[in-house]
Image (cartoon, rainbow, N blue to C red):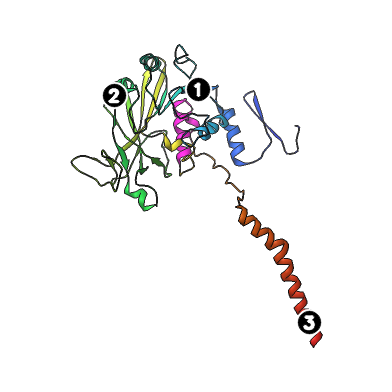
Amino acid sequence: IETNGEMVVQYQGRSEHLTVLGEQALTNLLMRLARERERLVMYLDGHGERKLDGGANHDLGNFGRQLRNKGLQVTALNLTVAPEVPANASLLVIAGPRVDLLDGETEKILAFLERGGNLLWLADPEPLRGLQPLAEKLGLTLTPGTVLDPGAEELNLPLPWALGANYGNHPVTLGFNLITVFPHARQVVAEESPDWRIAMLVESSDRSWVESGGLDGRPAFDRNRDTPGPVTLGVAMSRSRRDSEQRVVVMGNGAFLSNAYLGNGGNLDLGMNLVNWLAGDERLITLQPRPVADSGLALTRNAALAITLGLLIAAPLAFLAAGGWTWWRRRKL
């Protein structure tokens, strides 16, 4: 113990020091100690993907920080350099590449999948960038177009934001009843397969639809062209491989875990549940402790000047004037 109030927590021969007492810090420490072994989360890099250590609005840096706080090791993977996806990777994350993968890179991902690797694919509504063979291997159809939800507009959100209205019967969403927000999402359709066990994770509302046209102006549902809701936004797939279970999750959106939108509703909780299940730590699936609200007060220069003048000049002058008025009235009596 080096500081006042420091706590040492020991579990199964491992220990950690806790210097900041609070629900979030203590819960993160307990989850780190509860993991039976180190979990390595690797994310595909080199094609403009959302980075798990990036600070831009579209990146997943805040989510990556939450993963590290929970005891997961997060690192980038560039398959133009690496000969293969490492065998010790608990999970590979593919988060919206912006340029096409080389054929050899796609083959390495397919080989990882064939070896029984676990995968989290965050597929935004844009071209698959060389990952069409992966979709075919999984038996997936990633429908072109963007999911529009009138329910979002009623909450003063943009129309292209889909709200998670229904959750499937799956360990990831068991007892999950928080609102989730998916900006600019796409539909994910999984074909029935004798090999894979498939479960719907998140579904949009009945009033939503897949807009196959442009988003200019005021889009409206066209029954001859668009796909009516409810729309599946994410699926979980699993199958038995040798002596373990292989797990795959495909979400039709990556923005819900981005720095810009992670704090909306239950987005963080859903993301952590996804990773815990994929990494084989489903016993750690739970509602996450809420981050402490920002208690800082940001003032503009004019506001700070007004407060300073008011407290240091206007208020003393007002007290002085009130005192003088009282003294003058008493002298007249």
Q: Where 182 sits versus 88, above or below?
A: below
Q: Which residue: 77% across, 83% down?
A: 329
Nearer the observer: mark 3 or 2; the answer is: 3
Upstream in sequence: badge 3 or badge 1: 1
Q: Are marks 3 and 1 in contact (CB under 8 Å)?
A: no
Q: Which residues are magenta?
A: 266-285
Residue 155 appears left or right of 316? left
Residue on which disc 3 sits: 328
Q: Which mark is residue 76?
A: 1
Where's residue 9, x and y in %?
Answer: 66, 31
Nearer the observer: mark 2 or 1; the answer is: 1
Amino acid bearing label 3: Trp
Q: Quadrant of residue 208?
A: top left
Upstream in sequence: badge 2 or badge 1: 1
Q: Quadrant of residue 223?
A: top left
Upstream in sequence: badge 3 or badge 2: 2
